[in-house]
Image: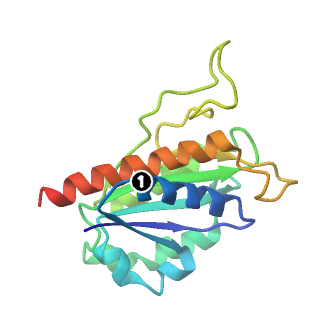
Amino acid sequence: MTQVSIVYHSGYGHTAEQAKAVGRGVEKVEGVTLHLLTAEEAQQQWDVLKTSDAIIFGSPTYMGSAAAAFKTFMEASSEKWYVREWQDKIAAGFTTSASQSGDKLSTLIQLAVFAAQHGMIWVGQDLLPGNNNSKGSVNDLNRLGGFLGAMAQANADQGPEFGPIQSDLLTAEHLGERVATIAKRFSESK
């Protein structure tokens, strides 16, 4: 059975909603088991990550970067890095911020570099950008135009019950399904 783990941090609940959406996408793929872990839980369950075929990383974007709590997880993984425990696993990422841009790309780049340092194989978003022409709308998938991973926006003055909006959650779900499909293909070819 193919194993996919999602490791995320969520400061205010918005990124947790995005992580759940990524998880729903993973669960759409038959023969794949999902492990949904906060960054704190993951540091207590390294064996789950060791047996995973794919790890999807998620963090809110704070001040143009991954959250400090997620960076703690990244730094704690150095022992796994040293022995190449995650080498050749599939990796992907997602992030949420309050602003339309919010420098989310910076966080996705940070997550991709982290995965590359571990020798992982990064999977980006395969959706064309939405909401980028006169016939587009905020209801389009990939409305924020991210290719490196799933991006979402949630208003700073509202809780996670109001955001990210449905199109951002469906974009995250699509990424989860894509990663699970690729991970399953890789695990079956071993």
Closest to the observer, 48 or 81: 48
Name the kind of residue labelled 1 in the image: Lys
Query: Are there few (<14), some (14-19), or many (20+) residues within 10 Å of tag 1?
Result: some
Vertical comparison of 147 with 33: above or below:
above
User: Can you say which quadrant of the picture contains the C terminus?
Assistant: bottom left
Percent of width and height locating residue 22: 51, 55
Residue at 59%, 60% (x, y): give it. Answer: 59
Which color mode does the image show?
rainbow
Vertical comparison of 168 with 52: above or below:
above
Asked if residue 110 shows in the view, the reply is no
Q: Going by the picture, which residue comes out furthest to the right?
A: 157
Closest to the observer, 127 or 122: 127
Q: Going by the picture, which residue comes out furthest to the top?
A: 134
- For the image shown, how many numbered marks are present on the structure? 1
Q: Quadrant of residue 135?
A: top right
Closest to the observer, 21 or 152: 21
Q: Quadrant of residue 137?
A: top right
Q: Quadrant of residue 130?
A: top right
User: Can you say which quadrant of the picture contains the N terminus?
Assistant: bottom left
Left/right placement of residue 120 relative to residue 165 reads left
Percent of width and height locating residue 124: 41, 43
Q: Going by the picture, which residue comes out furthest to the left?
A: 190
Residue highlighted by disc 1: 28
Percent of width and height locating residue 93: 48, 54
Closest to the observer, 44 or 29: 29
Left/right placement of residue 127 relative to residue 14 reads left
Q: Secondary structure at mark 1?
A: loop
Asked if residue 82 shows in the view, the reply is yes
Residue at 54%, 60% (x, y): give it. Answer: 58
Percent of width and height locating residue 49: 36, 75
Residue at 43%, 59% (x, y): give it. Answer: 27
